[in-house]
Image (spheres, rainbow, N blue to C red):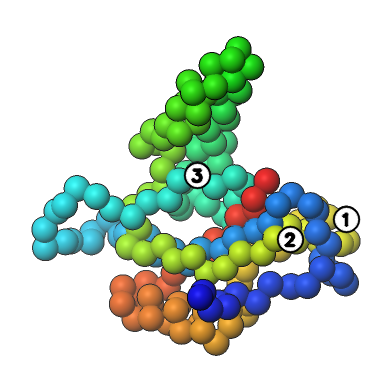
Amino acid sequence: MIKELIKFPQVGGAWQDSGEGGMYIYAVTLRPADHQDNCTVENGIVLTPPDYPVSDIRPFWGSPEDTFREHRIRDEAARLMEQQGRISAGITVRGLLSRDSLSAEMLAAVFMGSTRTSLMAADGSEAYWQAGWGDLTPKGGQVVHHLRDAFGITPALLTFLDT
C-alpha cells in the first residue's frame, strides 16, 4: 500500500474542483551533465510528456510549446485514422514516442501521490494548486530527504493535471 506522501488541499474555501480528472505529483532529481557512471547500460530514467504541466517543466522538457507540439500532432493523426475506421493504426500512432518528447534524463523520479480532484483557485484566477515543501507529509519529507542525501541534489516537486 502506498503511504500518503503529499497533503492535498480539500475542495472548499480557497480551492474548487475544475472537474478535469485529477492531479499527480512527482519528486524528480535531474541527472547533472557532469555525472559519471562506472559503466554504461544504455538506458536511463525519463518521463513521458504529461497531460498538462502545472509546474514549470522547462528544466525537464524544454518549453511546453515545443515539447507538446509533437504530442498534439500525433494525437490528431491518430484521431483521423480512427475516424476512418483504422482503429489499430490509431492506437499504434498514439503509442509512439520520439526521443524529443521524453524528459531530460534523471537520477530519480518518485511518484508522491495523486488526487481525483483538479484543484483550481476559487478566486477566479484560474491558477492551479502546485505541491510545495509544506505539502509533504512526514513520510513524504523522509523520501525527499533520502533523495537529497543519496544524490546531493534537492529534488523538484512537479505537479501535473490529468486532463
Few, some or many C-alpha atoms within 10 Å of disc 2 (few <14, some 14-19, many ≥20)?
A: many
Residue at the spot 58% in from the left edge and 78% down from the top edge: 4
Q: How many marks?
A: 3
Three-letter residue code for mark 3: Pro
Residue at the spot 32% in from the left edge and 62% down from the top edge: 107
C-alpha span from label 1 to label 3: 28 Å
Is disc 2 placed on a helix, strand or loop? loop
Residue found at the very far top of the displayed protein: 84
> Along the horizontal axis of the image, is 1 left or right of 24?
left
Earlier sequence position, callout 2 versus callout 3:
3
> Horizontal and vertical percent for residue 149?
34, 81
Residue at the spot 18% in from the left edge and 61% down from the top edge: 36
Is disc 3 placed on a helix, strand or loop? loop
Location of mark 3 (residue): 49
Is disc 1 placed on a helix, strand or loop? loop
Earlier sequence position, callout 1 versus callout 3:
3
> Horizontal and vertical percent for residue 153?
37, 72
Location of mark 1 (residue): 124
Location of mark 2 (residue): 117
C-alpha span from label 2 to label 3: 20 Å
Three-letter residue code for mark 1: Gly
